Amino acid sequence: MIISDVHTGITKNKNRKRVGRGPGSGHGKTSGRGHKGQGSRSGHSKRLGFAGGQMPLFRLVAKRGFNNNAFAKKVIAVNIGTLQKHFEAGTEVTPESLKRIGLAKGSYDFLKILGDGELTVALTVKAHRFSKSAQEKIEAVGGKAETLA
């Protein structure tokens, strides 16, 4: 079943490609595999990036240095001004409550509170890290900045 928006032309559920069902389908006879050769046979498996015997691009390009992306800890930052908008006075702000309202999306290792913006309500904020200015602003209005392990 195709559900589509008439005005925008967006198709939400697309029918699967039915190959080998005659010439009228557009995917008949060779079923999109072309004529003869390795790719037309069943059970073929060409490696990703295979260049037909030519030197593959990933071997041509020089690989140098070290990249820390795989090992670096992911830190999500939330500003004081954002907490002001989303929480009432006396509320306990935790990573779970931030996730619930969509301020700390996805997976991360540390939640850090930054000091951008103004805070006028006293909050108990629990996070892994705080910037110096954020901690000062939270405590200046009578709130608590608690560091998580």
Image (cartoon, rainbow, N blue to C red):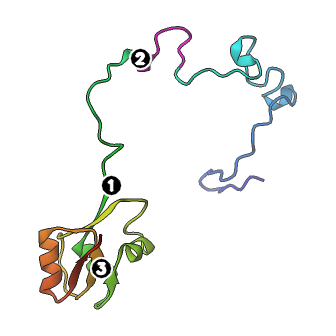
Q: Position of residue 34 (x, y in %)?
A: 73, 17
Q: Which of marks 2 and 3 is nearer the N terminus?
A: 2
Q: Do the residues labelled 2 and 1 touch (CB within 8 Å)?
A: no
Give SS at disc 2.
Answer: helix
Residue 90 is marked as: none
The residue wearing badge 1 is: 74
Task: Determine the secondary structure under disc 3.
Answer: helix
* Of the image marks 2 and 1, the number of the one nearer the N terminus: 2
Which residue corresponds to the image point at 27% horizontal and 84% vertical from the top-left? 124
Pointer 1 or 3: first along the chain:
1
The residue carrying mark 3 is 85
Question: Residue 14 at x, y = what percent?
Answer: 70, 47
Give the distance between the C-alpha atoms of the residues marked 2 and 3, in whole angstroms.
51 Å
Depth check: give the residue in front, 37 or 132.
Answer: 132
The magenta stretch is 50-58
Q: Residues within 10 Å of mark 1 (few under 14, many from 20)?
A: few
Amino acid type at mark 2: Arg
The amino acid on which the numbered mark 3 sits, given as a three-letter code, is Lys
Q: Is mark 1 on a helix, strand or loop?
A: loop
Give the mark toward the camera: 2 or 3.
Answer: 2
* Amino acid at dot 1: Lys
Task: Assess whether mark 3 and mark 2 are in contact (beta carbons under 8 angstroms).
Answer: no
The reply, left or right, for residue 97 in relation to residue 126 is: right
Give me the residue at 76% from left, 18% from top: 41
Name the residue rendered at 74%, 52% in the picture.
2
Vertical arrangement, residue 24 with respect to residue 137, above or below: above
Up-down: is 117 above or below 48? below
Q: Name the residue under label 2.
A: 59
